[in-house]
Image: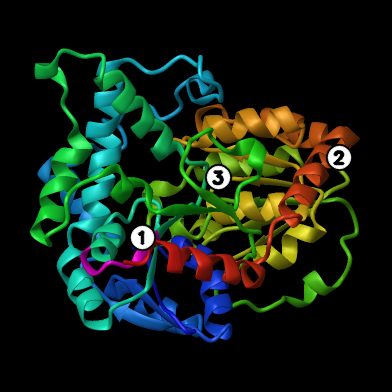
Amino acid sequence: MAVRVLFVTLPWKTHLFNFVPLAWALQTAGHEVHVAAEPDLTGAVTGAGLTAVPVGSGETMGERVRRAWREGTLPTPEEAPPPGHPVELYDLGPDRQRLSWQELNRIHDTLVVPRAWLSNDTMFDDLVAYCRSWRPDLVIWNAVTFAGSVAAAAVGAAHARFLFSVDLYSRLRDDQLTVMARQPPQDRRDGLKDWFAPWAAKYGVEFSEELVNGHFSIDQMPASFRLDFPHRTVSMRHVPYNGPAVIPAWLAEPPRAPRVLMTFGVSVRSWPELQVVPVERLRESLDSLADLDVEVVVTLPDDVRASLGRVPANVRVVDFVPLHAVLPTCSAVVHHGGAGSFNGSLLSGVPQLLVSTALDAPFKDHHLRAAGAGLAITPDRFSGPLIRENVVRMLEDPAFRAGAETLRREIMSYPAPNALVPELERLTAEHRA
């Protein structure tokens, strides 16, 4: 029997792209599929061949964040806590060290809760109203788009989190609840619940951890990257979608030398603040690779390309190239740690060098190294000599390719989106009220 499935995406194009192959699979299996997104993403949804449901304000996420910076309701990147906490704090095992109560509150107050209200507050009313009208059977929501779980609960729909990275939000939530239970009752402050519970109550839904975790989660990460939680998880093979794509003529030819891709995400096109590497250091890194027998491909927006100026003869600078097409031709990739670049590199079995300050970067670094599949540096250490050293190391040591290939085989063992549909149908019937 056909069911109605509503996807709820973070107002960010790359997060929408993570959903698209599963949405196609459900749609071609005969189910009704709609995608709820802020108006800014309507064109991207319909461009992917899916039905869009605009919810929320016309203000883009970028505009909203910059306004919050001006008003002082959101810490600027300079004011926020450094995201690169020691990876052992996130490591697996019941005896791991947990963050202190003060540190957990600081992270929730400056990162977790602000991201929650920035991503959800404007869409709650529209999303619940639409669910009450359309009555979906299953709501699949981005891991931090909690409005999706509230809307689902308001109409008795099954609902699932769709993870875009390692599940650090659940790890932080688990630590928050565990450490909070050790505090005196008068000190047990819960910033996430304080934000979440009034929104749920507005639509007749009682706050519970099920709203935070979903009935189940859909995870594309290798099992070795996952955190040990009792929540139900179903695995899905990552299938890349990069938006409208055209294969350039040069990509149809085999590379003349080992190809190294350097890409720092599409988000910097509208968010210059997200550029992790200054142009001067990027130019220095390209110069450091000039005498190597490699073919370097760099993706950069036009304005950054213009400021880059001269590039070495073995460097090709392009505005955009589909990752799913170029990654299989690469011998190494240097990137910012975004979901598309990271998961695409894993899927293609390519050794990768992360250059990131994202909250999940230390965890990815730890497990890439454990698998022998890659390396990482922080952007403040980005320099020509260090990039050269790491690239040469990944190219010359066959253990990196072997480690990346092991992870690729693990991912390929998971069901593709089409094969996952029957399990989603079963879970929908199990959890739908």
Q: Amino acid at mark 3?
A: His
Residue 95 image point, x, y percent: 51, 14
Residue at x 11%, y 54% (from the top left corner): 201
Q: Amino acid at mark 2?
A: Ala
Look at the image and name its color scheme.
rainbow
Q: Amino acid at mark 1?
A: Leu
Q: Quarter of the image for the C terminus: give it.
A: bottom left
Residue position for label 3:
336
Q: Is residue 133 magenta?
A: no
- Residue 10: mark: 1
Q: Please tell me in which quadrant of the rendered image residue 24 appears.
A: bottom right
**Sequence-wise, which precedes: disc 2 or disc 1?**
1
Q: Secondary structure at mark 1?
A: loop
Lateral position of residue 41 relative to residue 281, left or right: left
Whether residue 290 is visible here, answered yes or no, is: no
**Sequence-wise, which precedes: disc 1 or disc 3?**
1
Whether residue 275 is visible here, answered yes or no, is: yes
Q: Secondary structure at mark 3?
A: loop
Residue at x 21%, y 82% (from the top left corner): 133
- Residue 161: mark: none
Residue 12 image point, x, y percent: 39, 62
- Tell how many labels: 3
Q: Please tell me in which quadrant of the rendered image residue 34 appears.
A: bottom left
Residue position for label 2:
402
Callout 2–callout 1 Cβ contact below 8 Å: no
Label 3, residues with CA under 10 Å away: few <14, some 14-19, many ≥20: many
